[in-house]
Amino acid sequence: MTKLAIMGAMEEEIEPLLSHFENVNIVEYANNKFYEVNYNGLDIVIAYSKIGKVFASLTASTMIEKFSCDTLLFSGVAGGINPELKIGDLIIADKLCQHDLDITAFGHPNGYVPGGKVFVETNENLRNIAKKVANENNISVIEGTIATGDQFVHSVERKEFIQNTFNADALEMEGASVAVVCDALNIPFFILRAISDTADMDAGFDFDEFLKSSAKNSADYIVKIVDQLNK
Ligand code: 4EH
């Protein structure tokens, strides 16, 4: 690894990272800010994309093609589907899908378009490193499927559709688009989320209450993973 990308979607998701690293150099590009740091000899670029699949794809592509990052970590929050996941808990994506991608009118399965695949897998080596770090630090984390779509899910109906259709454990609005970009460009990537809400009636309320604390849970674990990668 020569340069590491760490991205979030919202400012709150990368703020705990930025306050951890010193001497940040800001580069403005593509209507966004990219925060360059050198952390114990490792070059890192940090950015938040803004919300949703399009902005997340743009930022991931930019970090890879413009900033020459060759490994990507995503840190942020998610709505929980798996009842084992409580607010604040961590989930590592082993694969991701787009729950709002729908050309079922033509007989294709949900989440599929020709030339693509329903599920994109994350890098196994990064997952194993993350699990080793979790073990050593007594961090409890589950591995599972994350479903992405351009919707803040706050209804049991939509949540159950996503659970039943993709067997997803958590949902958010960016991960799968980052996965598609990294997979196409052959960049090893890792997607971590901490639960901020459970995507039901109370999701908006819970999200506002737990965004910052859950974003910090995710970011703190990411820093430990970076330390391990940099050994
Ligand atoms: O980046 C978006 C944020 C919500 S939208 C996706 N993020 C948070 C993950 C997430 C999520 N996604 C879909 C957490 N809970 C989710 C859920 N459904 N229930 C947002 C939030 N605050 C202000 C503006 N937009």
Image (cartoon, rainbow, N blue to C red):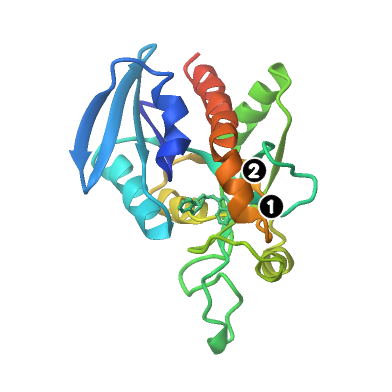
Q: Are marks 2 and 1 in contact (CB under 8 Å)?
A: yes
* Residue 188 marker: none
Q: Is residue 149 left or right of residue 24?
A: right
- The answer to whether mark 1 is within 8 Å of ligand 1 is yes
Q: Which residue: 19% across, 38% down?
A: 28
Q: Amino acid at mark 2?
A: Ile
Q: Is residue 112 left or right of residue 27?
A: right
What residue is disc 2 on? 195
Judge whether 72 appears above or below 175 on screen. Answer: above
Q: Which residue: 62% across, 62% down?
A: 154
Q: Which residue: 61% across, 76% down?
A: 109
Question: Which sits in the foreground, 186 or 177?
Answer: 177
Q: Position of residue 197 (x, y in %)?
A: 65, 48
Q: Position of residue 47 (x, y in %)?
A: 35, 37
Q: Secondary structure at mark 1?
A: loop
Q: Amino acid at mark 1?
A: Thr
Question: Which sits in the foreground, 13 or 184?
Answer: 13
Q: Position of residue 24 (x, y in %)?
A: 28, 21
Between the C-alphas of marks 2 and 1, the distance is: 7 Å
* Residue 198 marker: 1
Q: The N terminus appears in which quarter of the rendering?
A: top left
Q: Is residue 94 in view from this perspective?
A: no
Q: Secondary structure at mark 2?
A: strand
Badge 1 crowding class, 10 Å Cα cut-off, few under 14, some 14 to 19, many 20 or more, is many
Q: Is residue 12 in view from this perspective?
A: yes
Give the quarter of the image for residue 218: top right
